Image (cartoon, helix red, strand yellow):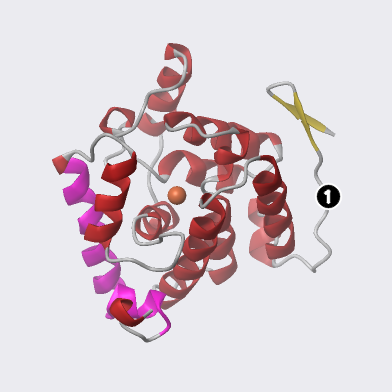
Amino acid sequence: MLFFFGRKAEKTAGTCENTDMERKLHLPDREEAERILLEGLKRNPGKWGMHSRNCADSAEAIGTAAGLDGNRCFVSGLLHDIGRRFGNVQLAHIYYGWKYMQELGYPAIARICLSHSFAMKTVDAYGGAFDLKDNEIQEMRDALKTMEYDDYDRLIQLCDNISGASGIMRMEDRIADIISRYSHFPKEKRQATFGLVDYFEQKTGKDIYQLACGGHTVDHY
Ligand SMILES: [Fe+2]
């Protein structure tokens, strides 16, 4: 039995056989990740659930084409926003997700919760409200400084920015949607985020939207 900010959380073992990577990295299997998401959505229902599912599917499709582990991509996408289970928060969803996944014993997912909004590797480029205590923000700054991003971090940063609640979106449309809900999306962060499209298109040799949409163009998804 685990406790987080005074709230009780229960961890159950997945019923599927765990893969080698899941065992080595202490990743949840798909069934466990789904259970964690559903439990979070019961606490705080919202569009973030469908956004997370689209992020998981696109991460699996693009990540597999880039030679990454499909299961790890999928569960990382599914749980990257799990901090939203604690309410309608902005910067705080990153901190809460990071801590919650650490507490459940999933450090590889915890780092995704931390890195997914920071393509520039700096908390200060975040476009929404800084709804955390100063020491919590500093804790994130310090952790990011020591972190070396890998392709799983980059992949979820990419997929977070092409996954809407209704499906895959072009990055420019998704960023416009983010700006309409938050205050801004700094120019440098925009460049870093668009750079992820080029990075994965070079890695896969394919159009990332076609990969994410199962071969269809984004306009027909
Ligand atoms: Fe997200």
Closest to the observer, 48 or 10: 48
- State the image coordinates of residue 188 (x, y, percent, origin top left): 16, 41
Circle 1 residues within 10 Å: few <14, some 14–19, many ≥20: few
Question: Is 212 one of the magenta-colored residues?
Answer: yes
Q: Residue drawn 41% across and 72% down?
A: 62
- State the image coordinates of residue 108 (x, y, percent, origin top left): 57, 47
Task: Please state the extent of the stretch shown in magenta in the rendering.
Answer: 188-214
User: In this figure, what is the number of numbered marks?
Assistant: 1
Q: Is residue 9 above or below residue 106?
A: above
Q: Residue drawn 51% across and 69% down?
A: 57
| Residue 119 can be seen, yes or no | no
Q: Secondary structure at mark 1?
A: loop
Q: Is residue 201 left or right of residue 104?
A: left
Q: Is mark 1 within 8 Å of ligand 1?
A: no
Closest to the observer, 116 or 50: 50
Q: Quadrant of the N terminus?
A: top right
Q: Which residue is mark 1?
A: 12
Identify the amino acid type marked 1. Answer: Thr
| Farthest residue, direction top | 134
Q: Is residue 211 left or right of residue 64?
A: left
Q: Is residue 21 left or right of residue 35?
A: left
Q: Residue drawn 41% across and 38% down?
A: 147
Question: Is 213 one of the magenta-colored residues?
Answer: yes
| Residue 150 can be seen, yes or no | yes
Q: Is residue 68 above or below residue 174?
A: below
Q: Quadrant of the C terminus?
A: bottom left
- State the image coordinates of residue 91 (x, y, percent, origin top left): 42, 31
Q: Is residue 148 left or right of residue 75?
A: left
Res. 127 image quadrant: top left
